[in-house]
Image: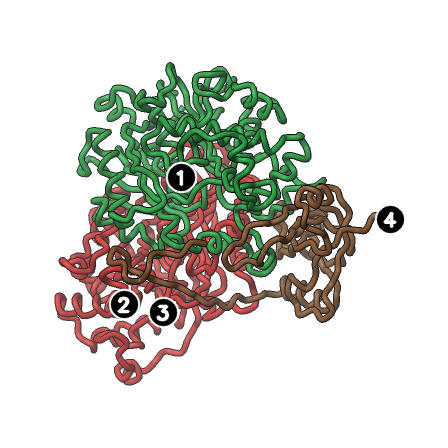
Chain colours: A green, B red, C brown
Amino acid sequence: MPKNRAAIIGVGETVFRKHHPDKTYVELAQEAAVKALADAGLTMDAIDAVVFSMAPTQFMGVNDADKWAVDSIFAAGKPFLRVHTGGATGGSALHAGYAHVASGMYRAVLVVGADRIAETPDAQHILNLIWDRFYEHDVALNTVTMTALSTHRQMHFHGTTQEQFARVVVRARRNAMKNPHAHLKGIITIDDVMRSPRVAWPYKLFDICPRSSGAAAVVVAHEDIAKEVCSRPAFINGIGAIANTVFMGDRMGPSADTEMSEIPEAAYAGREAYAQAGITDPIRQIQVVELYDPFSSTQFPQLESLNFCKRGEAARLSDEGAFEPGALLTVNPSGGTLCTNPIGVTGLVRVADAALQVMGKAGEAQVPGVRNALATALGGSVQFATCTVLGADSV
Amino acid sequence: MDVHVMGVALHPAALRIGDKRLEEVVFDTAHDALGNAGISRAELDHVTIAACDELDGRSISSMLLAAPAGAYLKDEIKVTDSGMIGLCMEALRLSSGRFDLGIVASWNKSSKGPLEDVMRMRCEPFYTRPIGLNMTIADGLFAQAAGEAFGITDDEVCATVRAGYERAALNPRGLCRAVPAMEEIRASPYVAAPLRKAHQAPVTDGAVAIVLASGRWLKKHPGARPIARLSGIGWRTDAYNLGNRRLTGFESLKGSFGAALSMCGAKGFADLDLIELDSQTGYHEAAFRRALGLPKSFTVSPSGGPFAQNPYFCTGLVNAAEAILQVSGRAGAVQVKGVRRAAAHGCHGFAQQGNAIAIFEGV
Amino acid sequence: MEKTANKSDANVIYGEWNVRYAYSVGKVAGTFFEGLKRKKILAPRCTKSGLSYLPPRAYCERSFEPCDEWAEAGQEGVIEAATIVTAAFENLPPPPYAIAYVRLEGVNTSMINFVQGLDLTDVTAAMARLKPGTPVQVEFVENPEGCITDFHYIVKSVS
């Protein structure tokens, strides 16, 4: 039993789109911070510390951009630090914010971040630079080919088809129509996905997330403050995270500790978060998941690793409509990362969207009766994973 | 604060580590820290790392460097501000009730790439980058502003630098460089006036790792022997903009110092035996002393501080390691007698936008 | 890749960053690259865990001990994962091309490199020839220089 329980009491997101020509990076962060504070009903004076969520700054082109943002998010003079775990950054930042409060040292913490992936035309070049200069850089690895390689195995082991992945995209874009912040949204068909330009087998353009710009923030507060100022806080009941080896070649084959195509990192992180939150039967106890899914193929292995169904079953359940809003399990009612991916803050957007569901503030996307929601984030060579279980009651 | 130091390791200091890849440097240091603590990697329940992609020469450098720091199949978080901020994050995690045994690791191998150009790219593109700030230029502005505000003369700075090298020469963990003559320091050319080249502590390559445990872990392992206790910690970040008294206000330094002191129950410097300061230049040491109100007799940087080694990104965490060695009686040739409580300081950002202080006590 | 707005756009300030680095090779990678010059693929091994690694590592992540032996990897192996890239990415080779993770004989982990010699005009058919488990062979360039592109994989011909 933790001594100091914490809850999310306010959420702020900007609209996500390719460019924000009318704002600078720091102004975007400011917009999200202001929204989160207003939602929490607090001023910056009540905030004891700040955690900044930001991954590679090469997309928006200012090193340590979080330090530039200090002035704009009213953080000057406060304890301030930045977390960076690649794509998992937003999830790790939330965990860091949680630690601030759970430690008993701080009562209210602002977790905030922003990104502008399309500030450079060289985004994929940058994503080639994350690989080992000696062994991987020259061999055309980027995040698309990295995931394509893993998905190739997933399809080989379970017989999953490209059309089954395409159905995930169709559902995501349709869900996103009810999310005022989502980047991509609309009615498309499986055929539209299948006919979109091929990128790296099995991916076509529509199987892949957009390059988004925008910002997000949440206010994490001690349970005592949450109960005082917030009618329906989202209690942070479980946090779990894991780092696997970067070497994908170590995560395949008979000597591997883990099988890459299963996204086993979600299993490790989920197990820990579930144990803390008292989740023993995920499909019954959790009503909404907001998964980190930059590719159409990323949902199924995560859902299986998170014990919502048996290994290899998620594609069939998806085909049967089990993951539609209000069905067996609502998956990514926000549209998820397939519709919105501002890398440095995407993991925080996952948490924010899950929190909105628990707090009853998800608007048109609201699923009725949400007691527990789960948010995930993935980073690196899909080696970093975070899981956060949010609940309407504190555990 | 109920956080305890189980072991510490410093990578051998070098101007340039030319014979190892960065992950080999990190592995060696983390491995040594675990050995020093008598703890196996399997026992850890989390890892905290502190590093900078741009200085590491690789985007998302933690992809490669998390496992060498011990994080294979562990819960790992990376902070990007400085090594000392890694210690701050680690202290929070150990105090949260979710984690009991961890390692914090940080490094700097900026001989690999252009540190000043990396710093220059920390300028926002509209107002400062066209003019061009970097570490040296920001420190030059600081030297002028703080120098004028406190009446710090060129002579005093030169003497401070020489004294730093003298102390550093005795530190077996430093680079053991020859002590420059006063005339040599005085004659050194300006780099960003009034800052002279010889006023700056040269940036070096290095790494540091510390193994820490919660009080709860210690109770469950009565045979374990901590070497120090982390009794106070505080960190603050100032405004990014260097105007508006930012260069002479020392708000984040004083705020961090006050927070750390009050956490460990100390009233002021009189309750501390020494402080290892992250003084990137002689101007910094002279200014920090005054800003913190330290009397001339107060022991500052017995290790030689950055003049012994200055792995820029983690110099603050090196200071923490030196402070731990002092309170545990293991500082060797630079040991100060009777040290019960030692403070360590780390800073980061343009003209030290962020500051952090950790206070250790002997056990 | 789309280009940004023309240079007379008052709403935008342009910047470009081209940072150069000099990465120390270290002894482990150095030994591996020297081996490539002799058309050999050398893999370090940890005697404590018994695992041998490609790409080479100085230490074993699982035992957390230094790798203390070297062994020569076989020049045949099996595909663990593959893809064919058909889109053009800036600063990457012009498509189409195939890459694969291959586990070579005697090594526990797999290593990525290009797959050459395959007809890529029909992508689906080509992918069917790159399934996990497919045997491949290493082929070296005529004059290796000590870098990873000194070799590539070729799918063993079906007789």
Pointers 3 and 2 within a single chain: yes
Work out whether B193 lies above or below A165. Answer: below
Q: Position of residue A372 (x, y in %)?
A: 41, 20
Q: Name the residue: 46% across, 30% down.
A: A188
Using the image, name the chain to which the residue with label 1 belongs: A
Q: Do the CB atoms of the residues marked 3 and 2 lie less than 8 Å apart?
A: no
Using the image, name the chain to which the residue with label 3 belongs: B
CA neighbours of label 2 inside 10 A, class few (<14), some (14 to 19), many (20+) = some
Q: Amino acid at mark 2?
A: Gly
Pointers 4 and 3 within a single chain: no
Q: Do the CB atoms of the residues marked 1 and 3 lie less than 8 Å apart?
A: no
Q: Position of residue B356 (x, y in %)?
A: 30, 51
Q: Residue A346's mark?
A: 1
Using the image, name the chain to which the residue with label 2 belongs: B
Give the residue number, with chain letter if any, for mark 2. Answer: B132
Of the two numbered discs 3 and 2 in the rendering, the one whose residue sits closer to the viewer: 2
Q: Position of residue B303 (x, y in %)?
A: 37, 64
Q: CA distance from mark 1 to mark 3?
A: 42 Å
Local SS, label 3 = helix
CA neighbours of label 1 inside 10 A, class few (<14), some (14 to 19), many (20+) = many
Which of disc 2 and disc 3 is earlier in sequence?
A: 2
Work out whether A228 lies above or below B210. Answer: above
Q: CA distance from mark 4 to mark 3?
A: 69 Å
Q: Do the CB atoms of the residues marked 4 and 3 lie less than 8 Å apart?
A: no
